[in-house]
Amino acid sequence: MGNDSSTVMGNDNSWLGKASVWSCITGVVLPGGLFALVLVNERLLPLETVLGAIGPCYILFVILELVALGCGIAARRTTTGKVGLVISGLLLLYPAVTFVLLVLEILGYRV
């Protein structure tokens, strides 16, 4: 009932900041856990299955970090939004650098 403009205007994005942080954490833990599960059962699975698990885990990581980045951008005025934005932005540097190095390798440049 106070003069809190965020509830009066309907701009309460704190849940987006929390979603950003949680999807950032999930984006690291879930693909890492799935890949660790495959590596633990490496003796039981053929090599093609183990190597084939790298791609889906990598794609899951990138998708969840992009979700975290988007939620962090939407909630950038909140503390949790800033935290999710910074962490997901730093974690997304890894796939970006990997992609650039892959393209340079395909084009024939020595890296």
Image: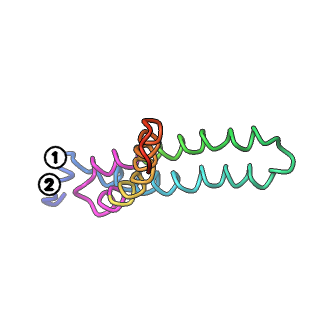
Looking at the rendered structure, the secondary structure element under dot 2 is: helix
User: Camera-side residue: 73 or 48?
Assistant: 48
The structure residue drawn at horizontal position 68% and vertical position 38%, both measured from the top left corner, is: 52
Q: Is residue 2 above or below residue 107?
A: below
Task: Quickly name the residue at label 1.
Answer: 9
Q: Return the residue at label 2.
A: 5
Residue 74 in percent (x, y) is at 27, 47
Looking at the rendered structure, the number of numbered marks drawn on it comes to 2
Q: Dot 1 lies on which element? A: helix
State the extent of the magenta-drawn residues as a range.
Answer: 67-85
How far across and down, in percent of the image, does residue 70 sit? 33, 44
Residue at image location 53% in from the left, 53% down from the top: 26
The percent position of residue 23, horizontal first and vertical second, equals 46, 51
Alpha carbon separation for disc pair 2 and 1: 6 Å
Side (left or right) of 85 relative to 25? left
Q: Which amino acid, by three-letter code, is at mark 2? A: Ser
Q: Is residue 1 left or right of residue 55?
A: left
